[in-house]
Every structure is written in structure tokens, then in C-alpha cells.
């Protein structure tokens, strides 16, 4: 209620008296108290309902306070005697995990050994200049060409050697003529030796001259043969029939003896795959085992056989060399990356899904469910993988219930609930 009185209708229009409430008017509590103390003298307003009020006896106030204190003490004692349980961890709040299991059984699978490597020529022969230093004046083959034995590959400048050969040939003819003349004179001297026309000294001189001229013929012939050999080495030819793998010779290039190879030729065009095989797999492979070689970008595989196994194992990488002989094919280019597989035999092995096999620092393992519905870790050794799954070499006998899903979230010895058991996977 504000300080200014509200406008109300006059009493005549409402038909009932109006009571104004001022600041000095006592509150409702005061009115109720007065009505209780002096019922005869107090007359309530005609429209107001009498308001009942229950008073709390002052003599009961100490009893109420004592009861409240007892209740508080009882509550404290209850909390001490019945402490609140510790909150459960997230792992404890979770229910028993559901897992799917399968019994792999034993299947006949083909064991294979996989490795990687590159295609290489079986007999890669480098061809270079084995004569005098010279300038290349002609190149007659390209990489990829098939050449025959003795075919000309390149030619060096022979402008100096050809005149030398011609000169030595002429010198040889001259030496032969002189040797023939000396030999004839010695024979004539021997014919008149009995008649005493020539002294013994002259005869000996003609004998020595004949021997010297004959030796000179041999010297000139040797010089001519050397020059001819040097001239021949200016012609770089293929020592074997095969395919030219690389060509580094260019016209105008100086070819030094003992330098880089000018050509590389694969003998007969034969190629092979050279790879590195793990130490544990090397013992399973034998020379003559069938192999399949896959080339990047070529859909069909190439058949081959193990031709050679390395005699040593690298102590650093624990790998040994393996070579697979292949039939010549234009798609088998030396240097191409290749992946090979060798079939080492068939055996009865358990096959499990890839999701069932886990690995850590200790190796590969799976979880199996025992008779008490507990997940038990089982160490296994993986021998191969196929489209059907992972082939287990040891650790399983095929009768276990192997966890196929949710194995990565289990702990050794944890209780699990099996949702269903599937049959074994099809054989690879």
C-alpha cells in the first residue's frame, strides 16, 4: 500500500462500510492477540474471516530442543557406523564383456614362404674398352636390342693404328725377303766349302747373317701381330649372344681401359629373381621348389623354380640370398621390384580370422575361452596368411574356443560371456 490512498467508490454506491487502514493501525497479529485476550470488546469486521493461530507453549521449548539434539547425534552416529560405499571404477561398473568365439579345427593348407627382391639378368656381363684409350666414333646398338656373339657394338678411332699396321706389314715382307737372301747365300757357301773357294770365316759370317735375318722376320711379325691386336680392340664386340641391358657409350666419348662399362649384356636373355629370405624360412626351402613371382603392374604371376640358395646368412639382417630362375619375357625387366612365394608343402593347420591374432613385444597370441568362461591368453606362432585367415603353426590344436572379436579389450583371466560359436573357416 502506498502513501497516497487509492480512490474507492463512496459508501453509498457499494452498500457497505469502508474501513481505512492507516500507518498507526496494528498488524494482523496484534488483532488476533487482542481478540483472544478480550473477546467481548473486539468486534471483527463483517467481511473478514476470523484467523486461528496456535501458540507453542514456552514450557515445551526445552523439550523440543533436546529432541532435536538427540536426532542430530543419532544421525551422526548412523553415518559413522554405516560409512558410504566407495564409488566403483569404470571397469567395475561395466558388465561382463560379450565375445564371439569359433572353433578353428584342422585344415589342409599349403605352406608358403614369401620374400621380396628384384628382377636381374642371370648372367649380367659388363663390356668396356680393354684396349688403348680412344675416342668413340660409332655406336651401333641400343638398350634392349638382341645381339649375336661377335656383333659390333661400338668402334673407337683407329686413324693411328691402321698406318702402323700397314707399315709393319711392309716391314715384315722386307724382313722375309732379306732372310730368304741370307739363307740362299749361306747355302751357296756351303756348296763351295769343299772346294776351298771360301774360308771358314766367311762361311760362318753368312751363317750368322741368315740366322739374324730369320730372327728379324719373327720380330717384325710379332710387332705386326701386336698392332693388329690393338687395332682389333678398337672394335667393341659382344662376347656372347644376349640382350643389351644398358648402354653408356656415346659418340665422341673418351673410352679409357678399366673404366665404367660401356654396355651390359644379359647372356641369352635369361633373367631371374634375386631376393632375401628370412633365416627361419631358409631351412624350409629347397633347390627346385616351385615358385611364383609377382611383378608390380603385371596382373599375371610368372612361374619359376628355386635355382640357388645363399651359402651364408647376413649376421646383421639375419637374411639369406635366394634366386628364382624365370623364363625370358618382355615384362621381366631387370631392376623391377618383385614379390616371390615358394610352396614348401601341405600340412594340417588351424586357420583363424585375422582379428583373432594379436601381437606385442612377446610375440603373437590369441585369447581362448576355457570351461569356466574365462579368457586365457595363448601364445601362437604364425606361419602364413591366406584369403581364409591366419595359419597357425603352433600354439593351437584346433579344438579351442578362440575369441574372434573384442580380443584386444580383454585381460588374461577375465570372465567373459560367449555370444555364439561359429564353425571353422574354409581351407585355403
Image (spheres, rainbow, N blue to C red):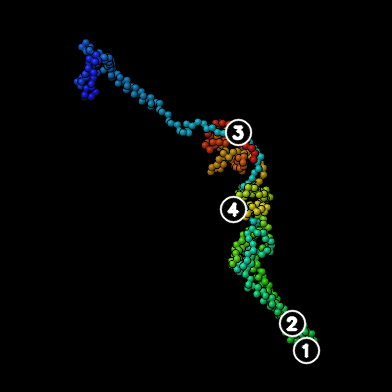
Name the mark nearer the viewer: 2 or 1: 2
User: For the residue labelled by badge 2, is the local secondary structure a helix, a strand or a loop?
Assistant: helix
258 left or right, relative to 84: right
401 left or right, relative to 218: left
Outermost residue on the top side: it is 40
Residue 119 on image: x %, y %: 62, 53
**Residue that badge 4 annotates:** 314
User: On screen, 10 above or below 349?
Assistant: above
Judging depth in this view, the residue of 293 and 348 nearest the camera is 293
Name the mark nearer the viewer: 4 or 1: 1
**Residue that badge 2 annotates:** 181
Q: Earlier in the sequence, mark 3 or mark 1?
A: 1
Question: Could you tell me if residue 255 is visible in this image?
Answer: no
Q: Earlier in the sequence, mark 2 or mark 3?
A: 2
Question: Could you tell me if residue 244 is visible in this image?
Answer: yes
User: For the residue labelled by badge 1, is the local secondary structure a helix, a strand or a loop?
Assistant: loop
Judging depth in this view, the residue of 150 and 394 nearest the camera is 150
User: On screen, 174 above or below 384?
Assistant: below
Name the mark nearer the viewer: 3 or 4: 3
> In the image, which disc is placed on residue 422?
3
Q: Are marks 2 and 3 in contact (CB under 8 Å)?
A: no
**Residue that badge 1 annotates:** 197
Judging depth in this view, the residue of 204 and 183 nearest the camera is 183
Disc 3 to disc 4, how far (Cα)? Answer: 44 Å
Q: Earlier in the sequence, mark 4 or mark 2?
A: 2
Amino acid at each position: 500500500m502506498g502513501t497516497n490512498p487509492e480512490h474507492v467508490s463512496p459508501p453509498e454506491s457499494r452498500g457497505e462500510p469502508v474501513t481505512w487502514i492507516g500507518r498507526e493501525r496494528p498488524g494482523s497479529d496484534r488483532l488476533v492477540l487482542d481478540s483472544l485476550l478480550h473477546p467481548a470488546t473486539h468486534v471483527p469486521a463483517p467481511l473478514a474471516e476470523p484467523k486461528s493461530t496456535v501458540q507453542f507453549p514456552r514450557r515445551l521449548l526445552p523439550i523440543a530442543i533436546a529432541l532435536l539434539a538427540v536426532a542430530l547425534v543419532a544421525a551422526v552416529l548412523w553415518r559413522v557406523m554405516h560409512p558410504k560405499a566407495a564409488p566403483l571404477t569404470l571397469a567395475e561398473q561395466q558388465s561382463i564383456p560379450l565375445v564371439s568365439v569359433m572353433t578353428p579345427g584342422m585344415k589342409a593348407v599349403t605352406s608358403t614362404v614369401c620374400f621380396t627382391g628384384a628382377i636381374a639378368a642371370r648372367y649380367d656381363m659388363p663390356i668396356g674398352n680393354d684396349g688403348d684409350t680412344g675416342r668413340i666414333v660409332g655406336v651401333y646398338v641400343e638398350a634392349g636390342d638382341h645381339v649375336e656373339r661377335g656383333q659390333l657394338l661400338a668402334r673407337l678411332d683407329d686413324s693411328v693404328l691402321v698406318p702402323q699396321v700397314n707399315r709393319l706389314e711392309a716391314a715384315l715382307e722386307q724382313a722375309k725377303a732379306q732372310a730368304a737372301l741370307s739363307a740362299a747365300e749361306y747355302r751357296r757357301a756351303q756348296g763351295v766349302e769343299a772346294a776351298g773357294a771360301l774360308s771358314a770365316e766367311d762361311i760362318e759370317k753368312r751363317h750368322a747373317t741368315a740366322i739374324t735375318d730369320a730372327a728379324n722376320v719373327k720380330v717384325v711379325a710379332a710387332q705386326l701381330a701386336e698392332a693388329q691386336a690393338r687395332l682389333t680392340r678398337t672394335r667393341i664386340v659382344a662376347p656372347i649372344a644376349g640382350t643389351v641391358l644398358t648402354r653408356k657409350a656415346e659418340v665422341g666419348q673418351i673410352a679409357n681401359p678399366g673404366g665404367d662399362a660401356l654396355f651390359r649384356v644379359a647372356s641369352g636373355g635369361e633373367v631371374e629373381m634375386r631376393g632375401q629370405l628370412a633365416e627361419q624360412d631358409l631351412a624350409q626351402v629347397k633347390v627346385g621348389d616351385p615358385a611364383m613371382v609377382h611383378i608390380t603392374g603385371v596382373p599375371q604371376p610368372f612361374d619359376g623354380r628355386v635355382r640357388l640358395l645363399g651359402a651364408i646368412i647376413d649376421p646383421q639382417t639375419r637374411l639369406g640370398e635366394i634366386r628364382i630362375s624365370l623364363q625370358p619375357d618382355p615384362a621381366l625387366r631387370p631392376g623391377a621390384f618383385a614379390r616371390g612365394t615358394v610352396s614348401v608343402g601341405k600340412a594340417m593347420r588351424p586357420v583363424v580370422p585375422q582379428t583373432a591374432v594379436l601381437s606385442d613385444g612377446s610375440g603373437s597370441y590369441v585369447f581362448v575361452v576355457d570351461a569356466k568362461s574365462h579368457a586365457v591368453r595363448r601364445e601362437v606362432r604364425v606361419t602364413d596368411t591366406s584369403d581364409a585367415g591366419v595359419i597357425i603353426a603352433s600354439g593351437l590344436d584346433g579344438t579351442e574356443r578362440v575369441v574372434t572379436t573384442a580380443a584386444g579389450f580383454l585381460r588374461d583371466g577375465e570372465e567373459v560371456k560367449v555370444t555364439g560359436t561359429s564353425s571353422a573357416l574354409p581351407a585355403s
